[in-house]
Amino acid sequence: MAQVGARRASPLTLMAEYLPTLRALLAGESVTIDGRYVHLDDVALDWPPTVAVPVFAAAEGPKTLDRAGALADGTVIPSGWSPNRLRDAALRVRAAAGERAETHPVVVYLPTRFADDAPAPEDAATRERASGSVVDVAETVEAFYAAGATTVVLQPHTDEDDLIGFSHRSGEVARMLRIAPTREPRAR
């Protein structure tokens, strides 16, 4: 937010005001709020969605994870996390979600590079990115699911120029995960 000149002194207060306000607007409600950052006077959407729209929040630090779990319908974890680091964050988010813990999605972005000639990857639980063969990437994705992710988004490496190939190989990973006999169904 600082990069675009929108940094707030209290991002947690902003989140606490913004998320319930957005949820109410998307539900077709008329909203009045005079908070520290959000100010609306009898505002409603002219054409609210006809179905419930989940509101997700991105979070990294402990307080933001707590707030996202308590206020959002799901939490997005940015790239650069390992399954080991995610495990504690997912537990924290779900603890803050309370009664909604079982249905609170945790979405993880995973920088990915498919390369059949890549060196043997390190332990899947410590990987912050996925690289290697389709099997190597699937192993990394499984480690994220085991750590508490409900959705893993494969993010092409920054110099990826074959997006069609990337999409095909991502599909191979998804098929491998769906047919594994020990795989538990997960929300997608």
Image (cartoon, rainbow, N blue to C red):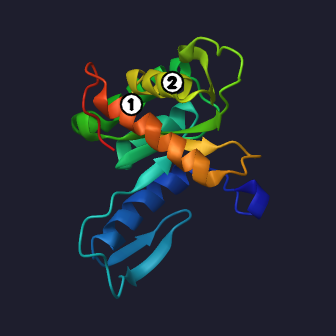
Q: Does 136 appear above or below 170?
A: above
Q: Which residue is labeled 1 in the image?
A: 176
| Occupied quadrant, residue 78 | top right
Position in image of residue 67 (x %, y %): 45, 42
Residue type indicated by callout 2: Val
Q: Which residue is labeled 2 in the image?
A: 135
Q: Does 22 appear above or below 179?
A: below
Residue 59 placement, left or right of 156 = left
Q: How many marks?
A: 2
Res. 148 visible in picture: yes
Residue 132 placement, left or right of 77 = right
Residue depicted at x 31% and y 33%:
178
In this rendered view, identify the residue nearer to me: 95 or 167: 167
In this rendered view, identify the residue nearer to me: 80 or 175: 175
Residue depicted at x 51% and y 68%:
38
In this rendered view, identify the residue nearer to me: 179 or 183: 179
